[in-house]
Image (cartoon, rainbow, N blue to C red):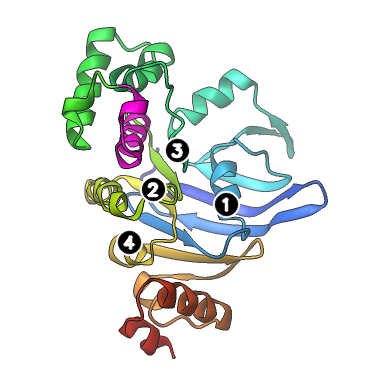
Amino acid sequence: MNNTLPMVRLESVHKSFGSLEVLKGIDLVMEREKVTCLIGPSGSGKSTLLRCINHIERINSGRIFVDNDLVGYTERGGKFYEMKERDTIRQRQQIGMVFQGFNLFPHMTVEQNIMEGPVGILKVPLAEARADAHRLLTRVGLAEKATAYPNQLSGGQKQRVAIARALAMKPKVMLFDEPTSALDPELVGEVLEVMRDLAASGMTMIVVTHEIAFARDVGDHVVFMDDGRIVEQGAPSEVLSRPSHARTQAFLRGVLLESAPTAAVTEMS
């Protein structure tokens, strides 16, 4: 595959739930080995956009490409045909996703949770999958939790296991849907630290987040969405410190005042 092409590309993507249009013609390019942060108010379409990228949600029109492959559909003679489920699953293996709610199997140990996908789907030999699970647990700082069950972990530990589980499938891109929103404030830092390490390693990441400091420090590209549209996008230094759109300015002023009234608020005034 041509490594000069973007990792993810959305072209005029529309998505509705009944009469409610959630995505209203999204055009967006997300580069390889970069971190794209999606910010905006609740209901702006950020999480839906993520779920469309890995075809958990079916789009109504437009096209989505991951590594230059059309997601969820094949195109023949100018017409689109939805992929068979087995082909969609195969494609989705390359797109790791970390949800707000962890989604770990409660009846499996941490080690088993991480091994399930590689063994069951990728047909990785058991010993290899176990060794990889332990390597990933060490990477996220949980080497001692291999035999623990999810109900024995804190929220931050569960989310770090969820990250390790997604990485075990060796994805081309990682999607994070508000990965810290369900955590107590004191546990947020340990998850963000793992994400920082991933970003530093060159993993392509798309992160829906309300952690503005993370977007500023780790993000390469920030996209502000509102009402199903992209209002503004660009480098964090521009979008977060010198936003040009009044709606972006109002959103950031509110978020920053809630968390800590810093000089960034003054800079935007």
**Residue linked to disc 3:** 97
Extent of the magenta region: 149-167
**Quadrant of the image occupied by residue 212:** bottom left
- Mark 2 burial class by Cα count in 10 Å: few <14, some 14-19, many 20+: some
**Residue linked to disc 1:** 10
Residue sitting nearer the eye, 142 or 13: 142
Give the mark nearer the N terminus: 2 vs 1: 1
**Residue linked to disc 2:** 183
Between marks 4 and 2, how big is the CA–CA gap?
Answer: 15 Å
Q: Amino acid at mark 4?
A: Phe
**Quadrant of the image occupied by residue 85:** top right
Give the mark nearer the N terminus: 2 vs 3: 3
Between marks 3 and 4, how big is the CA–CA gap?
Answer: 18 Å
Residue 118, horizontal then vertical, whole percent: 36, 18
Residue 155 highlighted magenta (yes or no): yes
Between marks 3 and 1, how big is the CA–CA gap?
Answer: 18 Å
- Mark 1 burial class by Cα count in 10 Å: few <14, some 14-19, many 20+: many
Q: Are marks 3 and 1 in contact (CB under 8 Å)?
A: no
Q: Secondary structure at mark 3?
A: strand
Residue 19, horizontal then vertical, whole percent: 83, 51
- Mark 4 burial class by Cα count in 10 Å: few <14, some 14-19, many 20+: some
Between marks 2 and 3, how big is the CA–CA gap?
Answer: 17 Å
201 lies above or below 213 = above
Residue 256, horizontal then vertical, whole percent: 41, 75
Numbered tag placed on residue 214 in the rendering: 4
Give the mark nearer the N terminus: 4 vs 2: 2
| Quadrant of the image containing the N terminus | top left
Give the mark nearer the N terminus: 4 vs 1: 1
Q: Secondary structure at mark 1?
A: strand
